[in-house]
Amino acid sequence: MSGAAAAGSIEQHQLMRLGERVLVACAFAVSIAMFVTLGWWASAPEDPLGAVSFLAHPQPWWMLMQLIGLSAVSATVSTLIGGRRVPELGTLTTCVGLAALSLRGAPASAMLLGSTDATQGSVASLGMNLALDTVVWFGVVLVAFVVSAAVESWCFGPRADSMEADREGTGIGHKPGSMDHASHTSPLGMIPAGDAGGRLYTVRSIVITSVIAVVALTLLAAGLSNRSIQHGQAIFLVAAAYWVAMSLTLHIAPSKLAFGPLVSVVLVAVGGYLWTSLRGSAAGPAPIPSTHFLRILPLQFVSIGCAMVLHKLGTIRASPLVEERRP
């Protein structure tokens, strides 16, 4: 190839990369716009100074159905716009949109203050409610996860690594859950049925990620006991904790599977809220939580935690498009 041709090829590649980045940015912008407008219309709390929560909404089931539909639409539109340029783009943009939605409401101090007024300082019932709220929000993210994978498979066909796996057979000899083994997993990033070794590897990934996330969150929250609760503080705690957790997990047990670390997010949040409920009454003024978990809204924990998991996996996971093989 001549020097001019090579320079033209490099310039074209750079222009394509710039165009891809613009498309990905558009996918994020569309998702954020959908959630801060339509999402807020569906989930705005009855109290103008309240936080976004299913359990605090006057019509929680109606709110849930609307957000599930919005999550599916967001995942579909983002996947169609961005394609496979970013792995699980539909789920990632939906998580970012949900995080933006949480900023329109009040921080967690509003829920803590309301619970304290109602129960004379007890946060036991609040912890149980927050745990249930976490599970519901994770269900909304899971809908985006499934829809994004389905739309990607239907619109863009099988991945190149999946086609290679079909030609080679079952992929025997790959370490379960490893980078190579991930080529033989389902499109949702889950271990296929009948793969006991893969399931064990996924459980190991969940345990490692959860333990590291709890430790990181505890260390990052040290010294915050006398400070008021803010949105930025809560988002930073979850994002930093899962950045550290995923960085170490990918070093200890490298894997391209997304389902295990995503489950870790909801397990850590639910466990933290339930542990808070067992501790009972808060010691101090109402806006000052008894544990650092009460500084974080379930919506923020789920959306930011899942977004960071997918971001870290996207930095190490190839997402090749199906290309025609040339002789």
Image (cartoon, helix red, strand yellow):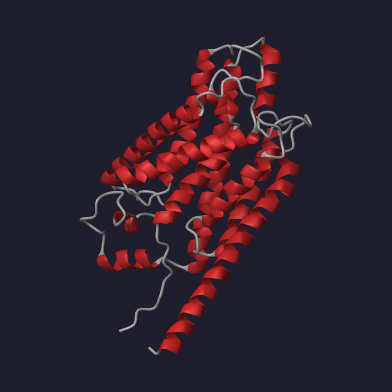
Q: Give the number of callouts.
A: 0
Q: Residue at x 69, y 20 (%)?
A: 113
Q: Which residue is drawn at 39% across and 44% down?
A: 247
Specify the quadrant of the image occupied by residue 227.
top right
Q: Residue at x 59, y 11 (%)?
A: 283
Compared with 269, 197 (above or below) is: below
From the top left corner, tell me how far across and down residue 257 is, in percent.
38, 50
From the top left corner, tell me how far across and down residue 61 is, in percent.
67, 36
From the top left corner, tell me how far across and down residue 311 is, in percent.
48, 50
Q: In this view, does 61 lie to the left or right of 323?
A: right
| Quadrant position of the N terminus in the picture | bottom left
On the question of residue 54 being in view, the answer is yes
Q: Residue at x 66, y 33 (%)?
A: 53
| Quadrant position of the C terminus in the picture | bottom left
Specify the quadrant of the image occupied by residue 125.
top right
Compared with 201, 272 (above or below) is: above
Compared with 162, 123 (above or below) is: above
The one nearer the camera, 242 or 132, is 242
The one nearer the camera, 297 or 130, is 297
